[in-house]
Image: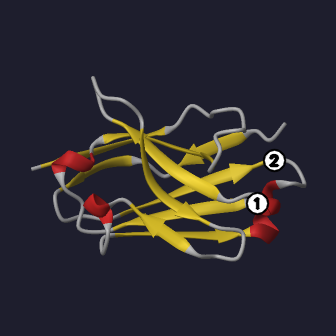
Amino acid sequence: QVQLVESGGGSVQAGGSLRLSCLGSGSTFSFHAMSWYRQAPGKQRELVAIIGTSGTTTYVDSVKGRFTVSRDNAKNTVYLQMNSLKPEDTAVYYCNSYSGSFTWGQGTQVTVSS
């Protein structure tokens, strides 16, 4: 079972940037489409971005043009570059396979102040 560890969160002002990382264990990491999710206080977890095994990407409309997902299979790592951050991006960010089949990590907190 792949274990996931997210990092890179923090507190920034609106307009700032952060780069999140998700390190996965196990040799099957590269065979899975991976996703970033986020959960804001009092809200359900939502899908933010997807990256396929070949690098194709998909984004939720609210982050298009601001967030970029990438992966380095040699390092078993998926990244989320977040630019032009808005207060509504405040949430705990998680990564997982697109199917949600891996054990969820603890996530990384992103707080954006206005």
Q: Residue at x 77, y 68 (%)?
A: 73
Please state which of residues 7 and 49 is positioned toward the viewer in this rendering. 49
Q: Residue at x 30, y 28 (%)?
A: 43
Counting the numbered discs, the total is 2
Quadrant where the N terminus lies?
Answer: top right
Which residue, as the protein is rendered here, is positioned at the far left? 114
Residue 102, horizontal then vertical, whole percent: 72, 38
Q: Which label sits on residue 76?
A: 1
Q: Residue at x 76, y 60 (%)?
A: 76
**Mark 2 to mark 1 CA distance (whole Å):** 7 Å
Using the rendered view, name the quadrant where residue 64 is placed.
bottom left
Residue 106, horizontal then vertical, whole percent: 56, 31
Please state which of residues 51 and 24 is positioned toward the viewer in this rendering. 51
SS for tag 2? Answer: loop
Horizontal side of 64 relative to 106 (left or right) equals: left
Badge 2 or badge 1: first in the primary sequence? 2
**Compared with residue 8, is residue 107 higher up or lower down, i.e. above or below?**
above
Q: Which label sits on residue 15?
A: none
Q: Residue at x 69, y 60 (%)?
A: 77
Horizontal side of 109 relative to 72 (left or right) equals: left
Contact? badges 2 and 1 (CB < 8 Å): yes
Which residue, as the protein is rendered here, is positioned at the far top? 42
Residue 27, horizontal then vertical, whole percent: 90, 55
Residue flagged by tag 2: what amino acid is it? Answer: Ser
The residue where tag 2 is placed is 25
Disc 2: CA contacts within 10 A as few (<14), some (14-19) or many (>=20):
some
Please state which of residues 103 and 77 is positioned toward the viewer in this rendering. 103
**Compared with residue 57, is residue 107 higher up or lower down, i.e. above or below?**
above
